Image (tube, rainbow, N blue to C red):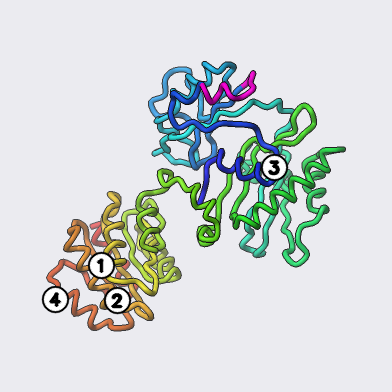
Amino acid sequence: MNIHEYQAKALLRSYGVPVSDGRVVLRAEEAKTAAGELDGPLWVVKAQIHAGGRGKGSFKEAEAGEKGGVRLAKSVEEAEAMTKQMLGRTLVTHQTGPAGKQVNRIYIEDGSDIETELYLALLVDRGTSRVSFVCSTEGGMDIEEVAAKTPEKILSFSVDPASGLSDFHGRRVAFALGLKGPQVKQCVALVKNLYRAFIEKDMEMLEINPLIVMTDGNLKALDAKIGFDGNAIYRHADIAALRDETEEDPKELAASKYDLNYIALDGEIGCMVNGAGLAMATMDIIKLYGAEPANFLDVGGGATKEKVTEAFKIITSDPNVKGILVNIFGGIMRCDIIAEGTIAAVKEVGLQVPLVVRLEGTNVEQGKQIINDSGLNVIAADNLSDAAEKIVKAVKG
């Protein structure tokens, strides 16, 4: 689960991390009052979407002279005008894709006197099963670009959970960032606070880009991006309350309400599979036969007829889907339940595209009989390879 910048900064502020004072604006008429509550003389007006690259992004149907999703205002009136320009518009960045994201929130904050821009992040390193720090002197840039062009400017190290975080880790970050004097002590405290927030709130990623050194020598988190482990949200009611469903894919949101593991992709063949491993194998073999999967969908081992029906509805709601492959290996999951759910869904929403069904395992004969007796135009498959070949052929002609 991701949150907006203004929410991330409020959370970090509660952990003692230095951030700018700011106000969130949901309606254009609130902008002038919000900006007037800040000191100025410089205000930063930021579009709030769950994507990076806002400053370099562009609005659809932008007017001449319009800039990106992060702008500098030199008066309260100018901040108000910029807010009106951005609210309700669609911002396109390199992370949103060509469709972009609609801006429903604006964050207005005090400007900062910047001397140096740095990069600092914490993330879960799946390779070592530890929390890792990533830091670089190249702040304000995409870290992927830095990694590709100047990887020597990135320092990354993990924290041993047995010994935990120590001042040494903070000093290591400070020296890597070229900090000196009192800044080193500030960095040690910053690293401690960030690590504590990361662990206590079950974060997956915490990125500060840029972390700035101001002209007075102090450190400040000028931007913040935080992602949480969705499987741990139940432990944090305060974090769950920050969820902005308008930023999420409607199909993924619908799937989460039925405890379905669904991720939207860009292909044309919808997949309904039980088990993450089998789902990955199904997507791989679809690609092997020359097509692209439209989704990852794991209905799980305890799926009911109702869950299977909802899963089918979600797949068919994607206009890019030109064919559907149901691939079930019944262990805990019974093939007859899948068959009943598929038929119920087809009868409810209709079947406008080819459907290939491959069933194997528990109650497989009953499942096949249910499908055969349904009278539906379903293509039967004997194994995974046969199923993939048939659905790709049906879609590609």
Q: CA distance from mark 4 to mark 3?
A: 64 Å
The amino acid type found where label 1 is placed reads Val
N-terminal of the two: label 1 or label 4?
A: 1
Look at mark 4 in the image and give the residue it sits on. Answer: 373
Q: Amino acid at mark 3?
A: Val
Picture coordinates of residue 361, whole percent (x, y): 33, 82
* Callout 4 crowding tier (Cα within 10 Å): few <14, some 14–19, many ≥20: few
Point out the image quarter for the C terminus: bottom left
Mark toward the start of the polypeptide (3 vs 1)? 3
Which label's residue is closer to the chain start, 4 or 3?
Answer: 3
Tag nearer the camera, 1 or 4 = 4
Q: Which residue is mark 2?
A: 359
Label 1 to label 4, Cα distance in Å?
A: 16 Å
Q: Does residue 378 appear anywhere in the picture?
A: yes
Secondary-structure class at tag 2: strand
Measure the alpha-carbon separation of dots 2 and 3.
54 Å
